[in-house]
Amino acid sequence: MAELQRPFVASEPHECKARAEDETLPAEERLVWAQLAVAAELAAIRQALAKSARRS
């Protein structure tokens, strides 16, 4: 029985960006990684804004 390979899991936005820029991956997969990178960056911005609002 063939062993299943675990999928890549990104934990940081820059990891998603690196996968999006990896030209060895199919274009569709790169597009998904690019969208995940943008979503992760937006989440980080929202967290930073919420944190600064609580300090004010």
Image (spheres, rainbow, N blue to C red):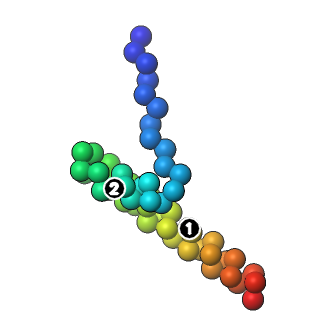
Which residue is at the far top? 1
Q: Quadrant of the N terminus?
A: top left
Q: Is residue 51 visible?
A: yes
**Number of other residues with Cα within 10 Å of mark 2, as a class: few under 14, some 14 to 19, many 20 or more:** many
Instruction: Provide the secondary structure element on which disc 1 rests.
Output: helix
Q: Is residue 28 visible?
A: no
Query: CB of mark 2 within 8 Å of CB of mark 1?
Result: no
> Is residue 9 rendered to the left or right of residue 33?
right
Specify which label sits upstream in the sequence, 2 or 1.
Answer: 2
Q: Quadrant of the C terminus?
A: bottom right
From the top left corner, tell me how far across and down residue 12 is, in percent: 51, 56
Q: Which residue is drawn at 51% across and 70% down?
A: 42
Indicate the amino acid at tag 2.
Ala
Q: Which quadrant of the figure has residue 44? A: bottom right
Instruction: Provide the secondary structure element on which disc 2 rests.
Output: helix
Q: Which residue is drawn at 43% across and 66% down?
A: 38
**Residue 43 - label:** 1
- Residue tagged 2: 20
